[in-house]
Image (cartoon, rainbow, N blue to C red):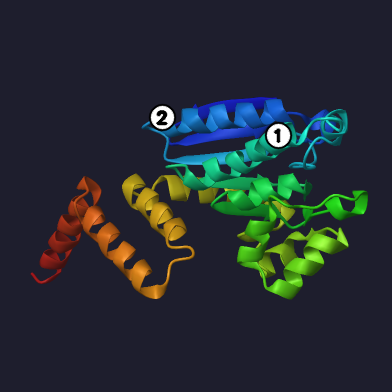
Amino acid sequence: MIKYDAAGQIARITLARPEKRNAIDDRMIAELREALDRAASEAETHAVLVAAEGPDFCAGMDLAMMAESGDAGAVELLKAAERLADLYRAIRKHSKPVIAAVRGRALGGGCGLAMACDVALAAESAKLGFPEVTIGFLPAIVMSMVRRVTGEKRAFELLTSGQAISATEAREIGLITRAIPDAEFDATVEAYVAGLAAKPPSAVALTKKLLYSIDGMNFDAALDAGSTMNALARMTKEARQGFESFARSKSGQKH
């Protein structure tokens, strides 16, 4: 259901349930969490790529599984919902940058999975949306992410229309990072991930941590958090080496 491969500086997590359009069930959530934990523990891994087998990235939650749980009690249903929320939270709190490569459809919780990643790269032919309302449900867990990146009116339309939008429109409103021509998609994704993995890992990790931690802070609190992280970053080996290298290059230009 989940395939994991690490080579060089990149860990690749692949959704491997194409016969179900990579729909999310409890097993997939558990295996994704295990794969993310593994990538976090590998010092040589600097970036994590989440992709999928088959024509679609992820069709959302497995509706057959949800139908089977229809008689479950409130506590059990809450725990099931929290497992998905915890998966998104684990991606957001992961120590490495996580990049989604989206082909085909990314719907409901599958669109949420792409949005939870730090970077979401989509082929121009991809479709993204939230069809839950069409079956009497709602995209409750992904709603916080949608609301953060879009205006109120656009968010309402996305969440209640049930209509999928193009990758180009998704990029324009902030659901994804880039919409890439299909013919260039694989090469562009590989180059993007390799470029991010080549950056000093402590600088990327601290940037990610600070960026998400200041969400919701007032201006003064965000500046204080930035000051603290600035001091921490200056103490890292990578930053010191970077400062020294820059100083040497400038010194050499004077002669």
- x%, y% of residue 123? 71, 53
Query: The C terminus lies in which quarter of the figure?
Result: bottom left
Amino acid at circle 2: Ser
Up-down relation of residue 233 to residue 42 (above or below) = below
At a point 57% along the width and 49% down the height, the residue shown is 117
- For image coordinates 43% across by 66% down, the residue present is 217
Residue 195 locus on image (x, y percent): 45, 50
Q: Using residue 97 as the reference point, say whether residue 198 is left or right of it.
A: left
Q: Is residue 207 above or below residue 72?
A: below
- Decide which of 14, 8 is in the foreground and name it: 14
Q: Quadrant of residue 64?
A: top right
Circle 2: element type: helix
Numbered tag placed on residue 237 in the rendering: none
Vertically, is 140 above or below 165?
above
Residue 151 in view of the camera = yes
The numbered mark at residue 41 is 2
Q: Residue at x 74, y 58 (%)?
A: 124
Amino acid identity at mark 1: Val
The residue at which mark 1 appears reads as 75
